[in-house]
Image (cartoon, rainbow, N blue to C red):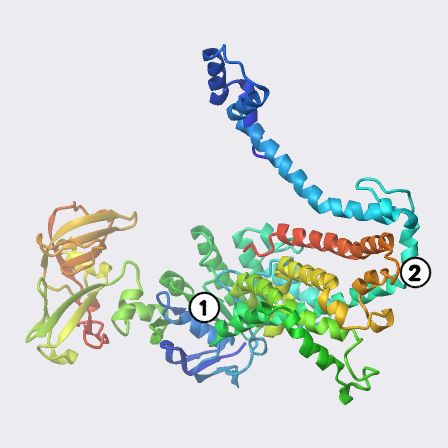
Amino acid sequence: MASVTLEGITKRYEDVTAVDDMNLEIEDGEFVTFVGPSGCGKSTTMETIAGLTLPTEGTIEIGGRDVTNLPPKDRGISMVFQNIALFPHMDVYDNISFGLRLRKYEQEEVDRRVEEAADIVQLEGMMDRMPSEMSGGQRQRVAIARAIVRNPDAFLMDEPLANLDAELRVHMRTQLQRLHRELDTTIIYVTHDQAQAMTMSDRIAVINSGVLQQVAPPLECYNEPANLFVAGFIGSPAMNFIEGEVVDDGFESVYTQIDFDPETHGVSPGQEITVGIRPEDVFLEADSRKAASPTKAFDAVVDVIEPMGKEVNAYLLFDRDVEASAEGRGEGQLLINLAPDTEIAEGDDIRIVMDRENVHLFDRASGDAITHSLE
Amino acid sequence: MSADPTADESADGDDPTVEMAEQAKADEPELDRGLVEAWAAKMISNPDRAYRATFYVATIFFLVTTLFPFYWLLVVALTPRNNLSEVGVFLPAGFNPAAFIEVFQTLPFHRYVFNSFLIATIATVAVLLVGSLAGYVFGRLRFRGRNAMLLLVLVTSFFPPAAFFIPLNRLFNTNVDVLRPLISAGSLYNTPYAIFIPLSAIFLPLSIFILMTFYSQIPDGLEDAARVEGTTRLGALFRVIVPLSAPGVATAGVLTFISVYNEYFFSSLMTDGRPGSWAPMLEGILRFQGEFEVLYNLMAAASIVAVLPVAILVVVAQEKIVSGLTTGAVKE
């Protein structure tokens, strides 16, 4: 068990900067998830922590020890890989005990530890199977057993659930959380799936284009995103964005107008800003009492309805002339989340209000958040 | 052969080609066909027979051309020395199995075979070791100048081996004082090194290419996993990458072994031909050729004896290659 500290980690390949000046402190026993779109540098960051690639600049400390230039085997870490990476020519026992045998542990100690690890991931009685004879979930459990058997200071998990089917993925997700509770070891987890990041982590590190965007507990990332990228990436369905500018008495875009005092929020008239509103923070005018502090109502047309069971997603257009884009999230469009019993039909003219307490303002030039509530 | 299902169909009479043939027969009842024409018509109406026939013809042809020389070697070996001028094509003129014993009595032929075997083994180990390191570097690492270096390795194999002979021969005949404690004369001439060093170098590029191809196929994740679990890069190579590339390693090893064992040019020139001077098997065979008489029967017997170790090795390695392939080692 140990803390992990990244200081000014930068990784440059010939002309690409994969990771740019990353600073991060992960506490002992914490479960931190690196999340971001494909190619954002989250895997590269993890590889530098593992020692599989060396950073161009910066230092890495694990448990207070500078490990920047140590080979992977001397860093006290273990890793679970996206493609599982069991050694195909070894049976389960040999796979799990590989690291212990390399470190010349006594045979009895190896047996005891392997049994213990297999017990934790429920692999009893499969010790002499070959990886090719096992299902995806079983192989994944062997990989986890191989990682925990050495009692490492920190676990690194690089999209360990990406290759499993949906049902198994949810199952393994709860298993991993239980494992973290039992072992109480630092876990660094990489995923592009914000749902996994939200559900499992103590803190999320959102990364885009090699730059750390926000490091915060999941709900803080959701409720108070630091910038436009985090706001759009965390949450499903994603936040709506409306581009417009600050006027004397609030915000104005082509189709909407929200009143607020620019001075109290530190913006000045003429500034280009983006309003962000989550689908669940928009209500029909008739239900406006559900909003803590409703804005004034806007006209909209229902374009497409998606009943999800526990809720209804409705794609709205602010005007009948708006050309609906394929994903329904372009200019003049809005996705809202309604109670399942709401009586609306495609083509209806409706009036909607937003909850002022959950209206986010972002500076369009920098993308940074200005405020997360207009109240 | 894949002919079976269609053959069944034609037996049922449902095959359109058969119907066509029957119709043709009905249409031209008067036509009087010769033997060859009838055979050709049969083949056209039922092409599977033609394919099967050509398959057997080709197989038998290749079997005869590869195995008959061995058979004829046996024929010559069994022919008694006095009847050598009357040796037949299919049957020996007489029966003298004692030639296989005489081979070892006339000369210490076993020593020649041992010399060759040892030289080939050392060369194979050296080639696999160096080839593995080079194959790892070329197959799995990216660095500036990789292609240029690969080309350079290739270029070595472009030269005819004879081009290296004169400089190497002079070099190996030079007395190097440093070597004196190791080698009695202080020069490499008449030592196994004189043969295995140049031959290893000549056969190395091929092995590098074979191993490079195999090693580059191993998923990166496996190497990373091994390194995180506690090996160095070198450890990952020999504990994970090499075992998973067993078929490739066996192929490169067998090719190198056979090439070195059977090599003629360097083998015949780098020693003085005496068994104590590490002269290889080939020199032994040539020694049955005296000034006044050539003992063809003993040469033939010696050739057969010399082939045996390699044949056994290949059969054993073959099993390894096949088992390596069938366990589906690299399947993720």
Q: Amino acid at mark 2?
A: Thr
Q: Secondary structure at mark 2?
A: helix
Based on the displayed image, in which of its 4 quarters is residue A193 positioned?
A: bottom left
> Does residue B164 lie above or below B100 as drawn?
below
Crowd around label 1: few <14 · some 14–19 · many ≥20 (10 Å) = many
Question: Which percent across, then down, holds residue B172?
Answer: 74, 80
Q: Foreground residue, B252 or A131? A: B252
Q: Which mark, residue B232? A: none
- How many marks the image carries: the answer is 2
> Does residue A152 lie above or below B69 as drawn?
below
Nearer to us of marks 1 and 2 is 2
Based on the displayed image, in which of its 4 quarters is residue A361 positioned?
A: bottom left
Which quadrant is the C terminus of chain A positioned in?
A: bottom left
Judging from the image, mark 1 belongs to the subunit labelled: A
Q: Foreground residue, B52 or B283? A: B283
Give the residue displayed 74% in from the left and 71% down from the top: B195
> Does residue B281 lie above or below A166 as drawn?
below
Q: Residue furthest front?
A: B292
Give the residue displayed 56% in from the left and 56% down from the top: A139
The residue labelled by disc 1 is: A189
Q: Secondary structure at mark 1?
A: strand
Judging from the image, mark 2 belongs to the subunit labelled: B
Left or right of A78: which side holds B167? right
Looking at the picture, do discs 1 and 2 lie on one chain?
Answer: no
Based on the displayed image, in which of its 4 quarters is residue A105 positioned?
A: bottom right
Q: Is residue A184 visible?
A: no
Question: Which percent across, then down, holds residue B8?
Answer: 56, 24
Crowd around label 2: few <14 · some 14–19 · many ≥20 (10 Å) = few
Give the residue displayed 69% in from the left and 54% down from the top: B320
Q: Amino acid at mark 1?
A: Tyr
The residue labelled by disc 2 is: B106
Question: Which percent across, then down, holds residue A201?
Answer: 42, 68
